[in-house]
Amino acid sequence: MRFPNDTAFHLRMAALVIGALFLEHLARTKIEHWSAPQIGVITFVLGLAWVTMAAFHHAKSTQDRMKVLEAKIDRLQALTDALADDKRARRSLPPM
């Protein structure tokens, strides 16, 4: 399922990655003793777990919100149908 704001999110993340790559290159060329930090496997796995848990939480809350909105739509549809039936009944000819 696509979210309404995912394009803006991906554009921001792409800009951050490109900016980080540019800054990394500048740091390597302009700072004499610069060395990029080394990321260990455990740190990487913990970071991925954090991102996964955040995505799961976001997806679950979105799914819950959709269920609530679907229930509201169903109630509004039932109310609209009842009002339309009532309006038709008032406009019809009285029984003979």
Image (tube, rainbow, N blue to C red):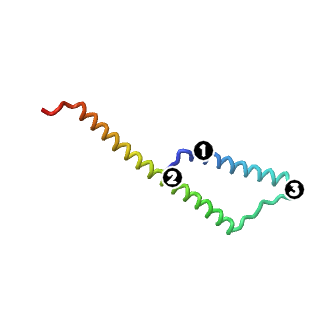
Query: Marks 3/2: CA distance?
Result: 48 Å
Closer to the N terminus: mark 3 or mark 1?
1
Residue 4 position within the rendered picture, expressed as x and y whole percent measured from the top left? 53, 45
| Location of residue 92 by image quarter | top left
Residue at image x 57%, y 45%? 7
Nearest to viewer (mark 1 / mark 2): 2
**Label 1: element kind:** helix
**Label 3: element kind:** loop
Which amino acid type is marked by label 2?
Thr
Which amino acid type is marked by label 1?
Ala
- Image quadrant holding the C terminus, namely top left
Nearest to viewer (mark 3 / mark 1): 1
Q: Which residue is mark 1?
A: 8
Nearest to viewer (mark 3 / mark 2): 2
Q: How dense is the environment of label 2, judged by Cα within 10 Å: few (below 14), some, or many (20 and up)?
A: few
Closer to the N terminus: mark 3 or mark 2?
3
Which amino acid type is marked by label 3?
Glu
Closer to the N terminus: mark 1 or mark 2?
1
Q: Nearer the viewer, residue 43 or 61?
A: 61
Residue at image x 30%, y 36%? 84
Q: Which residue is mark 3?
A: 32
Query: Marks 3/1: CA distance?
Result: 36 Å
Residue 74 position within the rendered picture, expressed as x and y whole percent measured from the top left? 37, 47
Q: How dense is the environment of label 3, judged by Cα within 10 Å: few (below 14), some, or many (20 and up)?
A: few
Query: Marks 1/2: CA distance?
Result: 18 Å
Quick one: which residue is furthest to the left in this view? 96
* Left or right of 68 on screen, residue 46: right
Q: Are marks 3 and 2 in contact (CB under 8 Å)?
A: no
**Label 2: element kind:** helix
Q: Which mark is residue 62?
A: 2
* Left or right of 68 on screen, residue 6: right
Residue at image x 40%, y 49%? 71
